[in-house]
Image (cartoon, rainbow, N blue to C red):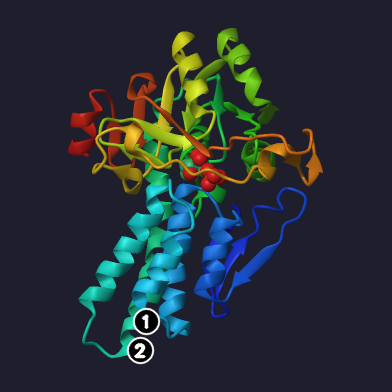
Amino acid sequence: MVETIQWTDDGVVMIDQTRLPREEVYVTCRTYGEVAEAIRSMVIRGAPAIGVAAAMGVALGVLRSTDRFEEICDTLARTRPTAVNLFWAIGRMKKLYESLQGQPIEQIRARLVAEAQQIRLEDIAINEAIGRNGAELVPDGKTILTHCNAGALATAGYGTALGVVRAAIASGKRVDVFADETRPFLQGARLTVWELQQDNIAATLITDNMAGHFLKSGRIGCVVVGADRIAANGDVANKVGTYSVAVLAKENGVPFFVAAPISTLDLTLASGDEIPIEQRAAAEVTHVFGVPIAPDATRVENPAFDVTPNRYVTAIITERGVARAPYSESLRAL
Ligand code: MRU
């Protein structure tokens, strides 16, 4: 399976997700500022993956710069606002740093580097557990529809939504995947299809506006998506377009599953209305691979995420088990 992100003696090495699937290029971030820029420009993306990147960024900052710890953390926290895993990972590094005050700097550095590597390893194990919990819910002999990329590339490895697919196949279920192309950044077309092909998992690419057609056709056994932040009431922020898929799934009686680690829960927010939604550059909408597809000076909106109300979510699959409505009780219990 693909290596999304790794700690090396040179720095933090990531596969450049802006260049997939045409080129498999690895970039090395040698400063925490470079890690922050890689997150902002989506060289690395996906909620758990940017959490791991941020943790490694903090470690790199303490190891190689003389900047204040707060400044390092703030720079990384300012990169992208929606995925709560980013803030969760920075928070975990902060807590460790504070607990080590008074110890020699060499020891603090070593512990922070070890912690960042530990977060990466834990993420893979968590995704495998999510996969096992989710595999039982997937109907045999049917197609799984997914949106965006919630695979190995969006995590330290194995994936959340695609982890469920991998585990279902490993358990003997015969499933294939329909991937929404996921305009405007095309994570489905560029990343999900590429990643599934690497593992010889049957994948079919559809454009986002075809999802309703296929959900009505009876071919889709369930929808499985990832999440960037889940509020206490079970409202789910995920890649823009997820909400439409969820509504269409419910309309057609198709189960809609969200696969995410506990670190994606934000129980401090009562509902999804409070989740900050990242607005990205207009050029992502007006251009495709640098080629303009709209008249010059076209007005654009480009929210990167939407919020699916909890009533459309059949279940939330985590490493600790499967939560169902009422989510305000089941998520807290996990
Ligand atoms: O903008 P992106 O590519 O970072 O958005 C990614 C998603 O929306 C994923 O579905 C989500 O982060 C879950 S990844 C396991």
Residue occupying the point 39% across, 73% down: 71
- Residue plotted at (57% across, 45% down): 280
Q: Position of residue 115 (x, y in %)?
A: 35, 70
Residue 153, x across and y down, in percent: 56, 50
Q: In the picture provided, is 289 more to the left or to the right than 161?
A: right
Q: Is residue 160 above or below residue 220?
A: below
- Give neighbour class at mark 1: few <14, some 14-19, many 20+ (Cα, 10 Å): few
Question: For the point 44% across and 82% down, which residue is it?
Answer: 63
Residue 334 in the image: above or below residue 27: above
Question: Disc 2 marks which residue?
Answer: 106
Is there a contact, CB below 8 Å, between mark 2 and mark 1?
A: yes
Q: Secondary structure at mark 2?
A: helix
Q: Quadrant of residue 25?
A: bottom right
Seen at 22% across and 82% down, the residue is 101
Question: At label 1, which amino acid type do we have?
Answer: Ala
Q: Is residue 215 above or below residue 133?
A: above
Q: Which residue is mark 1?
A: 110
Residue 4 visible to an observer of this rendering: no
Tell me which amino acid carries mark 2: Glu
